[in-house]
Image: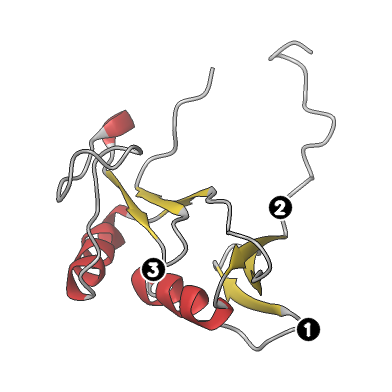
């Protein structure tokens, strides 16, 4: 498909995704607190965090085997980035400039914005950024 042709599925949007956690309440509350969001009411086995753009992360407990860490990236307004970093500092969570977590206490300046990575309670690699990645 050429980049000049309209995308045939342009109306497709992510609605939700399940995030495995050893304790859904702990993990959902952690992310909501860091991002300045709220945890929704439980829906069956899921505990949703509404990202405010029509997408929820639905935390689901998985206790019969180890959690396989995933990566989740959140685009935040530039004016809210410092507040996210301050909340990470307030709860004693180290953030990093790189996805491999080798440059602690620093943010990056990729694509003309700012970004940082941090681990959630189950080791998911969370990212906050103020500019989306440039795509070819």
Residue in the image at 52% along x and 24% along y: 135
Residue extending farthest to the right is: 8
Q: Earlier in the sequence, mark 3 or mark 1?
A: 3
Q: What kind of element bears circle 3? A: helix
Q: What kind of element bears circle 2? A: loop
Quarter holding residue 89: bottom left
User: For mark 3, does the 10 Å Cα neighbourhood hold few (<14), some (14 to 19), or many (20 or more) residues?
Assistant: many
Mark nearest the camera among 3 and 1 is 1
Label at residue 35: 3
- Mark 3 to mark 1: distance in Å? 24 Å
Which residue in the protein does label 2 denote? 14
Residue in the image at 23% along x and 61% along y: 85
- Mark 2 to mark 1: distance in Å? 20 Å
Q: Position of residue 101 (x, y in %)?
A: 28, 42
Give the side of residue 94 with respect to residue 44, left or right.
Answer: left
Q: Position of residue 67 (x, y in %)?
A: 58, 58
Residue in the image at 58% along x and 51% along y: 68
Residue in the image at 77% along x and 17% along y: 5
Q: Is residue 16 above or below residue 72?
A: below
Q: Quadrant of the N terminus?
A: top right
Quarter holding residue 76: bottom left
């Amino acid at each position: 498909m050429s980049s000049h042709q309209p995308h045939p599925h342009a109306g497709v949007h992510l609605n939700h995704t399940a995030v495995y956690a050893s304790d859904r309440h702990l993990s959902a509350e952690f992310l909501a607190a860091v991002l300045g969001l709220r945890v929704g009411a439980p829906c069956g086995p899921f505990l949703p965090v509404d990202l405010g753009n029509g997408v929820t992360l639905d935390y689901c407990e998985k206790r019969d085997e180890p959690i396989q860490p995933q990566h989740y990236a959140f685009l935040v307004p530039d004016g809210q980035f410092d507040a996210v970093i301050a909340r990470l500092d307030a709860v004693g969570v180290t953030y990093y400039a790189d996805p491999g977590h080798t440059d602690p206490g620093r943010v990056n300046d990729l694509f003309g914005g700012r970004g940082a990575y941090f681990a959630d309670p189950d080791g998911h690699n969370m990212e906050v950024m103020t500019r989306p990645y440039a795509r070819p």
